[in-house]
Amino acid sequence: MSEDNNLNHLNFSRKQKWEIVRTLLERDRIRNQAEKAFRTAYPNAPERMINTAVFHIYIDGIQAALDWLVDVELFLQNPKHTLSEGITFHLIYHLYNWLQFTAILSDTDEDLVEKINDVKAAIEDDDKDAALNILEELKNKFEGNLESPNFF
């Protein structure tokens, strides 16, 4: 599916979007459904990554999004209500982890072969530091230790 087709829902009316969100919130056994969907979409993903993605999107992520929306509405109802940075960062935390998951899984076999070839070339050029840097980058990517973006 192309990126453009994947964004068609942005043209939905608020009522259509609300119905989809309501359906999401009313799901029973959402963890099982999410695990199945992720395994289908990412068949080569390690179990640990699937569990992490399910948590950040469907377990705590949905709650963080709801908490943020409630905080936003409470501010409109009473401008003395301070919008919580903690609630905002909680949502950003889950969104960032989703982006990290997709960044890690975006590497194709060809990308990995290219990195391996880069390590091989660095070794052949007697550039131990370059080889070690590439290997450390790969290790961090597979362990999910990518640097968080600076939001400020």
Image: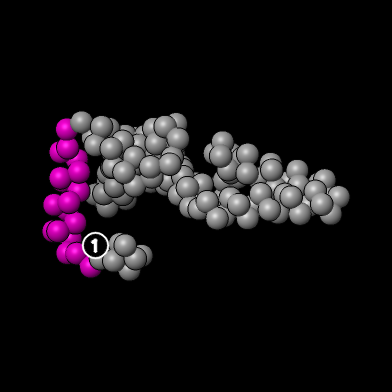
Q: Tell me which corner region of the image, top left, top right, bottom left or bottom right, holds residue 145.
A: top right
Q: Is residue 90 above or below residue 11?
A: above
Q: Is residue 103 above or below residue 36?
A: below
Q: Position of residue 152 (x, y in %)?
A: 57, 54
The answer to whether any part of residue 51 appears in the image is yes
Q: Tell me which corner region of the image, top left, top right, bottom left or bottom right, holds residue 42.
A: top left
On the rendered structure, is 69 left or right of 118? left
| Residue drawn at (17%, 37%) of the image | 27
| Residue drawn at (31%, 36%) of the image | 35
| Residue drawn at (14%, 58%) of the image | 16
Amino acid type at circle 1 is His
Q: Tell me which corner region of the image, top left, top right, bottom left or bottom right, holds residue 91.
A: top left
Q: Is residue 44 above or below residue 13?
A: above
Residue 53 or 124: which is nearer the viewer? 124
Instruction: Name the residue carrying label 1.
Output: 9
Numbered-mark total: 1
On the rendered structure, is 76 left or right of 122? left
The answer to whether any part of residue 130 appears in the image is no
Q: Position of residue 22 (x, y in %)?
A: 15, 46
Query: Quick one: quadrant of the N terminus?
Result: bottom left
Q: Check disc 1 and report its element: helix, strand or loop.
A: helix
Q: Position of residue 119 (x, y in %)?
A: 72, 49
Colouring method of the image:
one colour
Residue 69 or 125: which is nearer the viewer? 125
Magenta stretch: helix, strand or loop mostly: helix
On the rendered structure, is 46 left or right of 3? right
Residue 56 or 142: which is nearer the viewer? 142
Residue 80 inside the magenta-drawn segment? no
Q: Which residues are magenta?
A: 10-28
Residue 32 or 80: which is nearer the viewer? 32
Is the residue marked by circle 1 packed among few (<14), some (14-19), or many (20+) residues within 10 Å?
few
